[in-house]
Image: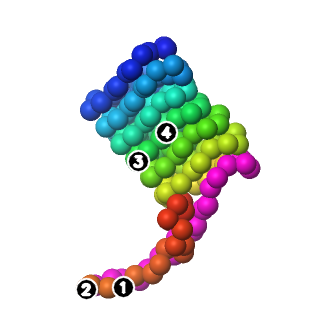
């Protein structure tokens, strides 16, 4: 969709597509939202799962097993509470989430098993409350972004009503590698 006005994509599924599963090129003058999408669950899209231009919201989506990035955003986007797994898919080079410009907010996502968990190419973004695990590199973020990463401390067995180990930070905006 190019220069779409007030587009919402909800509750859908995209599988085995030759290019990007969902491609929203530019929403700079509109409101574009992608929510509750399964993009390539257990199958391979030929490129990225979800690709956007400027001014988009991507929330509560599952992007899995794409050759490229799970979610690829340009600028001024909100990437919130998504599940990104196995992107790059062994045959490609992909991140769970990849931001290629500034003014993005990347929050509350879980990125596992990709070449890169969260990849940010340009300064001027905020990256908070995310978790990454099992990626070749969990975090590839250039200088000049707002980000705090904590390597979570694992706990022993827990049984009953208490126990465990603090994750390593009390900062409510910390990102965790586990």
Q: Nearer the viewer, mark 1 or mark 4?
A: 4
Q: Tell which circle, 1 or 4, labels the residue nearer the N-terminal end.
A: 4
State the residue position of label 3: 81
Left or right: where does residue 127 sit relative to residue 59?
right
Q: What range is drawn magenta here? A: 142-159
For the residue carrying disc 4, how many other residues have a C-alpha within 10 Å: few (<14), some (14-19), or many (20+)? many
For the residue carrying disc 3, how many other residues have a C-alpha within 10 Å: few (<14), some (14-19), or many (20+)? some
Q: Report the disc number at residue 78.
A: 4
**Which is more toward the observer, 150 or 134?**
150
State the residue position of label 1: 163
State the residue position of label 2: 160
Q: Report the disc number at residue 74.
A: none
In the figure, 125 relative to 132: above or below? above
**Whole-percent x and y of residue 124?**
67, 42
Seen as rendered, the residue at the extreme front is 29
Magenta part, dominant SS = loop
Residue 158 falls within the magenta-colored stretch? yes
Secondary structure of the residue carrying tag 2 is: loop
Residue positioned 52% across, 35% down in the render? 77
**Which is more toward the observer, 93 or 56?**
56
In the figure, 45 relative to 132: above or below? above
Left or right: where does residue 163 sit relative to residue 97?
left
Q: Quadrant of residue 171?
A: bottom right
Q: Nearer the viewer, mark 3 or mark 2?
A: 3
Label 2 close to label 1 by CB (< 8 Å)? yes
Label 1 close to label 4 by CB (< 8 Å)? no
**Whole-percent x and y of residue 32?**
42, 26
Cα distance between the residues tagged 2 and 1? 8 Å
Secondary structure of the residue carrying tag 1 is: loop
């Amino acid at each position: 969709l190019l220069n779409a006005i007030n587009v919402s994509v909800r509750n859908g599924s995209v599988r085995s597509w030759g290019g990007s599963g969902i491609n929203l090129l530019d929403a700079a003058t509109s409101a574009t939202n992608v929510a509750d999408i399964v993009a390539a669950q257990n199958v391979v899209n030929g490129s990225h799962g979800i690709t956007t231009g400027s001014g988009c919201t991507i929330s509560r989506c599952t992007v899995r097993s794409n050759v490229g990035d799970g979610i690829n955003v340009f600028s001024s986007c909100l990437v919130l509470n998504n599940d990104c797994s196995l992107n790059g898919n062994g045959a490609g080079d992909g991140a769970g989430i990849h931001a290629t410009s500034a003014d993005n907010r990347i929050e509350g996502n879980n990125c596992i098993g990709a070449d890169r968990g969260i990849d940010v190419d340009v300064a001027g973004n905020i990256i908070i409350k995310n978790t990454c695990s099992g990626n070749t590199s969990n975090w590839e973020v250039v200088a000049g972004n707002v980000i705090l990463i904590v390597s979570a401390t694992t706990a022993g067995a827990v049984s009953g009503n208490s126990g465990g180990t603090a994750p390593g930070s009390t900062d409510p905006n910390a990102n965790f590698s586990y």
